[in-house]
Image (cartoon, rainbow, N blue to C red):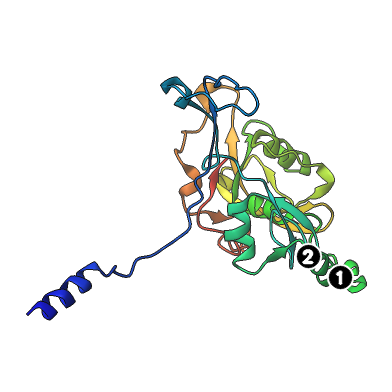
Amino acid sequence: MLKTWSCSAINLLKSTATLQQQVRTTFVLKRKYDPLLHKTNEKPRKLRAKHFIYELVEDTNIKRRPNIEVVLKTYVEGVGDKGDVVSVRPNFAYNKLLLPGLAVYKTDENLTLYAKTEEDAKVVSHSSAFAQRTVNVIERFSLSVVMNKDHPWVIEPWHIKASLRKAGIHCPEECITMPEERIEGPDFNKEGKEFYCTITVNNLEKARLRCRIHHWSTDPSDRLPYTPEYWKMPPEPLFGNESSGENVETKVEEK
């Protein structure tokens, strides 16, 4: 009976399996009141209660961690090209670059291993780290090209440039390529119809910009009725050989 009881007690004292994980909680403190000094070879004075009052100097739990330098193994949109050394935030480096295998830590071996070769330097697939992101932004647009309904006009690159500037994008005229067919007006049969023009980014990347024609009048009483959220309406191509849904995301932005 005694043996059984002792075995049960020993089993109860055994600790269950727990997850033991190191937690770094370091606080830097300083005394609010400095203790008095004592003479050499004499017993230190007894500390009073006020000497155990501390002020917080630094909490390492909320301290901003420094950036991490990594070497890219391939092109990463918005970050850089292969072999580039970039300094990014720790969370972004771990979750978006290191774990997916797009980058490695910066070391002398990795710098040599992933350096650009002569063949890589000859093949230029991206003009800059942000060029592809710019192309994606442009191709999400449904650009409104506002034209006069009272006077004849022909859509030219400077019309697209002005419309882009109103949307917050500055683009030179020489980077805008218009469709081969001439677009003239005013023609209310073209109202709300969509056509494409090509935007060249850094003389390398090409982006297809969706444009919709809207007629406008300086006389408020002669203006067409306003169509709310026109960019959500199914577009009708201006030219029969164009497909308004080709290589374009469903979601578009109001411009």
Q: Residues within 10 Å of mark 1 (few under 14, many from 20)?
A: few
Q: Is residue 102 left or right of residue 32?
A: right
Above or below, 151 against 22 in this view is above
Residue at the spot 29% in from the left edge and 69% down from the top edge: 16
Q: Which residue is found at the position 47% from the left and 34% from the top?
A: 226
Do the CB atoms of the residues marked 2 and 1 lie less than 8 Å apart? yes
Q: Residue 219 lies in what quarter of the image? A: top right
Quarter of image, res 254: top right
Horizontal and vertical percent position of residue 112: 85, 69
Instruction: Name the residue rendered at 50%, 33% in the picture.
Output: 224
Q: Amino acid at mark 2?
A: Lys
Residue 43, compared with residue 133, is above or below; it is above
Local secondary structure at mark 1: helix
Residue 51 placement (x, y as % from top left): 48, 23
Disc 2 is placed on an element classified as loop
- Tell me residue 207's x, y (percent): 71, 56
Q: Quadrant of the N terminus?
A: bottom left
Q: Which of the numbered marks, if any, corresponds to residue 120?
A: 1
Q: Residue 82 has which mark?
A: 2
Tag 2: Cα neighbours inside 10 Å, few (<14), some, or many (≥20)?
A: some
Q: In this view, which residue lies farthest toward the front?
A: 41
Front in this rendered view, residue 252 or 69: 69
Q: Position of residue 192 (x, y in %)?
A: 54, 46
Residue 238 in sight from this viewpoint: no
Quadrant where the C terminus sits is top right
Position of residue 101 relative to residue 194, above or below, is below
Q: Amino acid at mark 1?
A: Asp
Q: Residue 207 got which mark? A: none
The mark that comes first in sequence, 2 or 1, is: 2
- Give residue 240's quadrant in the image: bottom right
**Distance from label 2 to label 1 (Cα)?**
9 Å
